[in-house]
Image (tube, grey):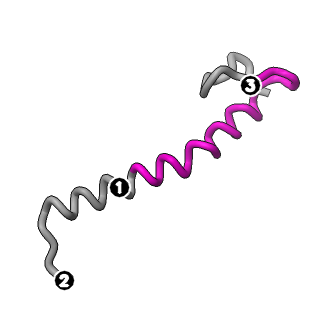
């Protein structure tokens, strides 16, 4: 199957975007788990003293 160069780049861009959307919740869970108990981070802020 022959695809145009633009189609290939569009497909790759779409895959990278989907990968980012899939990995973002796991990253958020990981960062939240490092914060002290009972506190909730604003966004994906890395804690000063990970626990």
Instruction: Name the residue that disc number 1 marks.
Output: 14
Q: CA distance from mark 2 to mark 3?
A: 50 Å
The residue sitting at the right extreme is 38
Instruction: Name the residue that disc number 3 marks.
Output: 50
User: Residue 24: where, in percent of width, then height?
Assistant: 56, 42
Would residue 1 appear left or right of 24 to someone viewing this image? left
User: Residue 2: where, in percent of width, then height?
Assistant: 14, 78
Instruction: Name the residue that disc number 2 marks.
Output: 1
Residue pictured at 38% horizontal, 58% vertical: 15
Return the residue nearer the eye: 50 or 14.
14
* Label pair 2/3, CB-CB below 8 angstroms: no
Q: CA distance from mark 1 to mark 3?
A: 34 Å
4 is higher (above) or lower (below) than 29? below
What is the quadrant of the C terminus in the image?
top right
Q: In the picture, residue 38 is in which quadrant?
A: top right
Instruction: Give the magenta part as a residue range.
Output: 17-40
15 is higher (above) or lower (below) than 28? below
What is the quadrant of the N terminus in the image?
bottom left
Q: In the picture, residue 37 is in which quadrant?
A: top right
The first of marks 2 and 3 along the sequence is 2
């Amino acid at each position: 199957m022959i695809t145009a160069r633009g189609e290939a780049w569009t497909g790759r861009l779409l895959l990278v975007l989907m990968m980012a959307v899939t990995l973002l919740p796991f990253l958020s869970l990981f960062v939240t788990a490092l914060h002290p108990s009972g506190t909730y981070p604003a966004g994906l802020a890395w804690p000063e003293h990970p626990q």
